[in-house]
Image: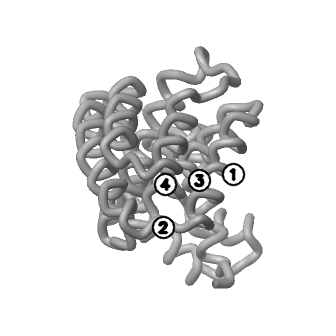
Amino acid sequence: MTATIADTIYQALSEQIVTGALKAGEKLRQEHIARAFDTSHVPVREALLRLEAHGLAISAPRRGTRVSALNPSEIREVIEMRVSLEVLALTHAFSRLTKADLRRAEDARIACDAAEDMTTWERCNRAFHRAILTPCEMPRLLTAIDDLHIASARHLFANWRQQWRPRIDQDHAAIVQAMQRQDAAAACEILRRHLRRVG
């Protein structure tokens, strides 16, 4: 599927919000964004609506659209939801796993371990979790998980940026190994522990 200009704008703005380059409360001015991407207001409006749908922006009459505030108290809820939903998705993925799925998971794991900066790592980490969960073939569940990943990423950048270092993720390796030997119980338990540790 070909990316549209609205997709490009959404991706660029969402990454800036997640990484903190665009701060909470900052106004997202349609005319500035349209000029920056050399486009009309229509794809900009579409991108802003998607940011709102994913909880990254809020709009109010006569105040326009702004970057949403980050609520520190929500992280526990986000982690608990991720534990429940990702374990559910991984459980359902096992009956549909193919060799190609396992290859994608292993490639995503390697890319994550190779990341040398936090922005690249976070993108690769999200891709790894998406790779191990996508075989569940439950699109609504995966969409809900994607939104939780966005919320998690904002908290990580806000609170963990100074501590981040390149590293090998042993949990990711153990999850892939359990998937390769079709051990659903082990993979789900490692994932549960992994997510709680991050939280």
- Tell me the CA gap for discs 4 and 2: 29 Å
Q: Which mark is residue 10?
A: none
Q: Are marks 3 and 4 in contact (CB under 8 Å)?
A: yes
Mark before the other along the chain sequence, 2 or 3: 2
Amino acid type, mark 3: Ala
The quarter of the picture where residue 138 lies is: bottom left
- Tell me the CA gap for discs 2 and 3: 31 Å
> Going 73% across and 32% down the picture, which residue do you hit?
117
Label 3: which secondary element: helix
Q: Which mark is residue 132?
A: 4
The residue wearing badge 1 is 107
Mark before the other along the chain sequence, 4 or 2: 2
The residue wearing badge 2 is 48
- On the question of residue 191 being in view, the answer is yes
Amino acid type, mark 1: Asp
Q: Which mark is residue 105?
A: 3
Q: Are marks 3 and 1 in contact (CB under 8 Å)?
A: yes
